[in-house]
Image (cartoon, helix red, strand yellow):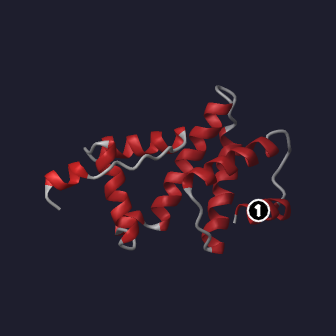
């Protein structure tokens, strides 16, 4: 589409959450794009069936990174790295095994909830963990 016609199109307003906006801004900066360019590229790829770089494992890695950020922001200086790793690993393995796809932002929030739940416990009960993960799916 010629540039002058694009300028004439009315803009589309969206209101992403802070976590999602931060992720998009990070991705845009890493890719040398404006936020608008990054959004358009991602939308085009999603409508075209997804780009190879947008694989499930890439999305899962992003979700895991977001999870760490969400938990650390909610508990500055008091995160137990071993517990956080166990919760994130358990959740990501469960998702891969069940072939469940979840938005990274939702996954991050869910991991933060699981972390909070297991924070005062001695260990992670696998049956209980499985029930929680089914709620996510």
In this view of the protein, can residue 86 be seen by the observer? no
The residue closer to the viewer here, 17 or 102, is: 17
Residue at screen point 35% across, 72% down: 48
Which quadrant is the N terminus positioned in? Answer: bottom left
Which quadrant is the C terminus positioned in? Answer: bottom right
State left or right for residue 14 relative to residue 6.
Answer: right
User: Could you tell me residue 118's position as x and y percent?
Assistant: 80, 45
In the picture of the structure, the residue carrying the numbered disc 1 is 135
Instruction: Determine crowd level at label 1: few under 14, some 14-19, many 20+ residues with C-alpha closer than 10 A.
Output: few
The residue closer to the viewer here, 80 or 37, is: 37
In this view of the protein, can residue 46 be seen by the observer? yes
Indicate the secondary structure of the residue bearing disc 1. helix
**Total residue callouts:** 1
User: Could you tell me residue 28's position as x and y percent?
Assistant: 33, 45
State left or right for residue 70 relative to residue 117.
Answer: left
Q: Against 85, is 89 above or below?
A: below
Q: Against 132, is 7 above or below?
A: above
Residue at screen point 66% across, 47% down: 109
Residue at screen point 53% across, 59% down: 60
User: Could you tell me residue 68's position as x and y percent?
Assistant: 59, 42
Q: Residue furthest top?
A: 77
Residue at screen point 81% across, 64% down: 131
User: Could you tell me residue 54's position as x and y percent?
Assistant: 40, 64
């Amino acid at each position: 589409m010629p540039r002058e016609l694009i300028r004439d199109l009315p803009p589309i307003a969206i209101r992403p959450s802070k976590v999602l906006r931060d992720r998009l801004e990070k991705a845009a900066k890493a890719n040398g794009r404006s936020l608008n360019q990054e959004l358009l590229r991602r939308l085009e790829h999603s409508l075209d069936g997804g780009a190879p770089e947008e694989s499930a494992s890439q999305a899962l890695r992003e979700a895991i990174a977001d999870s760490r950020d969400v938990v650390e922001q909610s508990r500055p200086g008091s995160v137990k790295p071993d517990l956080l790793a166990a919760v994130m690993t358990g959740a990501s393995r469960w998702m891969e095994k069940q072939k469940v796809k979840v938005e990274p932002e939702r996954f991050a929030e869910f991991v933060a909830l699981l972390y909070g739940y297991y924070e005062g416990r001695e260990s992670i009960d696998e049956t209980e963990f499985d029930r929680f993960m089914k709620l996510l799916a």
